[in-house]
Amino acid sequence: NIYGYEFLEKSFSFDDPLWMDVCQARYQFLIRNYVDKTRIPVSKGCHLIGIADPLGLLRDGEIFVRIVTNTDDFVLEDVDAMVFRNPCLHPGDLRIVSAVNYTELHYFCNVVVFPCKKSVLRNLPAECSGGDLDGDKFYVCWDKEIMPPKHLEHPACPYHRIAADEEKNKCTQVALANFVARCFASDALGRIATAHLAISDIQPNGARDSLAIEVAKAQSLAVDYPKTGVSPLIPEEARKILNEHGLPDFMKSSQGRHYISQKPLGSLYRRAVTFDLNYEYVSEKSNNPKSLYLLPGREKYYKVARICYSRYLSKIIRLKVCFGIKSDAEALLGRALSWHPNIHDFGKAGKAVE
């Protein structure tokens, strides 16, 4: 089946303690994804690079998507889909489009093709958080249970109307130095994203609230500040609300006030934390299974096994010291529940462990 339970039951013994540790560690990694990133897999969706329609076939509001995998090959045809890209803070960053099928475009697979002929009035990539087609990736989802109805689509944010700073044409060394200094001083991407998430949770209308929309615009200014020179500002009303309510519990802030969120993110966070704590409790109470490896009739291999185990143990200890890995299962999976403080690129660290 899709999760491979039948394969696992036939290929592995669940009495093997190492295999059980790997399964349990994998389970905890999945739970931590919910706790830390709220990563929810969507079967009817994909993450694709956007390209322009070179043949000029697509019309306004249309896209072409062909998905090719090892086991499947299909084209989205005559269905509505939503397209967005990260960061998706403004409610207008999520666009509802029509996925159509053109035989002439079947050459392009595992990408999302956008219209680009002169008669097209909407710039779909630009409407998705101010994106373009120079390598940007877009999320495409055609799950009707997730996609909002067409009549509730929020107007796109007019990113193209953001005016550039008047001093952008002054190319003196002093102006350049002042601009670089302002770039460092205005590096508020993280703070604005945090404020937007909290305001969206506090306000009844969520991300569609007018104050949340203003914070989303400030985030867009922060992203483009090195290009436009327009400094982002968080609305004063948003600051007052954050000081009054604090941050929701799912943001796991150790500073300032916090409250219990009553929205889906808060509910999912608390349920995931409960599973995570239950796992840790069961792991602490588990018995030592080393006796399972002491098989009768294998005594003659004991010395060789001790030498092999010593070599294996030295490598595992080296991984634990260098990367912060706590168990053999984490080493086998190439992931750590808590990396070493000096490690910042978890992807490269995982590949090094593997």
Image (cartoon, rainbow, N blue to C red):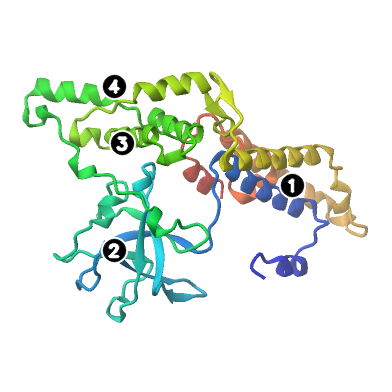
Q: Where is residue 170, by image quadrant?
A: top left
* First in residue order: circle 2 vs circle 3: 2
Residue 12, horizontal then vertical, whole percent: 76, 63
CA separation, marks 3 and 4? 19 Å
Question: Which residue is under mark 3?
Answer: 217
- Packing grade of label 3 (10 A; few <14, some 14-19, many >=20) is many
Q: The residue under label 2 is which amino acid type?
A: Gly
* First in residue order: circle 3 vs circle 1: 3
* First in residue order: circle 3 vs circle 4: 4
Question: Which residue is under mark 2?
Answer: 61
| SS for callout 1 | helix
Image vertical order of residue 137 relative to residue 165, above or below? below
Question: Which residue is under mark 4?
Answer: 185
| SS for callout 4 | helix
Comparing 51 with 152, the one in front is 152
Residue 244, horizontal then vertical, whole percent: 50, 19
Image vertical order of residue 161 relative to residue 149, above or below? above
CA separation, marks 4 and 1? 54 Å
Marks 3 and 4 close (CB-CB < 8 Å): no
CA separation, marks 1 and 2? 62 Å
Image vertical order of residue 21 relative to residue 244, above or below? below
CA separation, marks 3 and 1? 58 Å
Question: Which residue is under mark 1?
Answer: 309
- Packing grade of label 4 (10 A; few <14, some 14-19, many >=20) is few
Residue 104, horizontal then vertical, whole percent: 27, 79
